[in-house]
Image: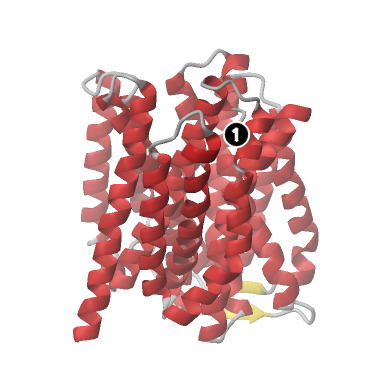
Amino acid sequence: MTISNTTNLPFASPRLAFPLLALVQAILIFTITLISVPLPLIGREFGLDTAELVLLQVSYGLPYSGLLLLGGGLSDRFGGTPVLHIGLWIFGLSSLGAALSTSFEQLVAMRAVQGMAAAMIAPAAVAHVAVLYPDAQDFDRAMARWGGVSVLGAAAGTVLSGVLTTWVSWRWMFAVPCVTVFVALVLRGRVFPVVQAHALQGRLDVLGAVLALLAFVSGGYALSMGSEHSWLSASVAGAGILAVLAMAGFVWWERRAALPLLPPDFFDDRRRVIGSLGILLAAASMGLVTFILALYLQDGPGWSPLATAMAMVPYLAVLVLGGVPATGAVLRLGAARAMVLGLCLAVVGLGLLSGFGPDYLAQILPGLVILPAGTSLMFASSAVLLTQGMAPERMGLAAGVMNTAMELGPTAGMAGFLAFTALRHELKDGWSLALMAAAGVALMIALYAALGQKERGNG
């Protein structure tokens, strides 16, 4: 982020600006899960099958993740302030449109526009945080808290959606982002610093943005629909092939572009790799557990939406209570060691949840307590690993990568794990296998991160 004119208003104190920016970030993640619990009700209202429910679930996250690198480039090139302003307006209007949707197609379209706007907001918000905390240690501490805020947003969406769905309507869930955007737009000129930037030399990498979006959307579609239709069907196979070609084209182009959205040397630092994998898995595991339990508890034991939401309260409580300890652990142990610890806890939590059943206290609750303890550490340490030591002119890039990985988790990542359900005849057995697969991936990432620590120690 090449800052040419960064103006802190007289009362643009981090004590006021950071909580509001963090609230905006939490709402972006909240919006991913706000329809998780009422999915069965939405499905009955619009007459949707399971594949369409999955498509609705990922319609926000796929454009969000696919356009985040472009959002980071826009923030670096034009400054965080105008990008944040425009993104907030689009996000607020599309949230209102989603609440007023009269058809499945309209709801999916509004969710997609929400995702596009979120891709502008997230990197711009991190650019503001970098200005608020110019000291490196203060910034690391702020980013550790930032990661915790993200995970709280996801959990809050699950619980609040069940409450509002029971007492009013699932449409009222979209009032939360509408109100948040209104508050942010009213107060932004009073509490946010002004972050401006010179236009960088060269053209914006539009082709890279198109290829990334095409790869994420087509890949997410193939993974989402593969478990419902034949993997060799024309639509699924075609989308999968298109995703592979688009991703190959993206990698090829980024090595040749004058100003690439994702410079090839970004992942030369092992911290960026571990941070990206960690936050992707943390988000994927949250989305996977929420999706499976929301459908199972309502369609299996026949729980109400409110009871299903209350079942997730222990999960949310651990996230809330674990936010401060997670930040402290990252600062004391170091982000990489805290990541390994978080991944190990996630292995245990996901392993326990893979044996879910109708006995909530014995078969669900233990995993719902251990998993969020791990994901809190993973989110906090990932936010630090991905931004630590990053040059100011690359802060938008780092934020774009961080949020891309975060959004790929509950979309492409979750869909990839759900693809394992096709290997079992019974849906419940397939869901258990998906959770076991997530635990296995967590273990592999933990070994990779621990190996990196050993290599640095020997070096």
- Name which quarter of the figure residue 188 lies in: bottom right
Residue at point 42%, 62% (across, down): 342
Viewer-nearest residue: 89 or 135: 135
Residue 443 is situated, as x and y percent measured from the top left of the image, at: 29, 56
Residue 23 is situated, as x and y percent measured from the top left of the image, at: 67, 58
Question: Please, what is the three-letter code of the amino acid marked with disc 1?
Answer: Ile
Mark 1 neighbour class, 10 Å CA radius: few under 14, some 14 to 19, many 20 or more: many
Residue 157 is situated, as x and y percent measured from the top left of the image, at: 63, 43
- How many numbered circles does the render carry? 1
Residue at point 70%, 66% (across, down): 19
Viewer-nearest residue: 277 or 89: 277
- Name which quarter of the figure residue 261 lies in: bottom left
Residue at point 64%, 51% (across, down): 27
Horizontally, is 408 left or right of 163 in the view? left
User: Regarding mark 1 in the picture, which secondary structure is present there?
Assistant: loop
Quickly name the residue at label 1: 35
Colour scheme employed for the rendering of this structure: secondary structure
Up-down relation of residue 172 to residue 66 (above or below): above
Up-down relation of residue 210 to residue 16 (above or below): above
Residue at point 62%, 33% (across, down): 308
Residue 437 seen from this side: yes
Up-down relation of residue 250 to residue 237 (above or below): below
Residue 261 seen from this side: no
Up-down relation of residue 309 to residue 341 (above or below): above
Looking at the rendered image, the quarter that the C terminus falls into is bottom left
- Name which quarter of the figure residue 3 lies in: bottom right
Viewer-nearest residue: 441 or 220: 441
Horizontally, is 321 left or right of 288 in the view? right
Residue 305 is situated, as x and y percent measured from the top left of the image, at: 65, 28
Horizontally, is 114 left or right of 95 in the view? left
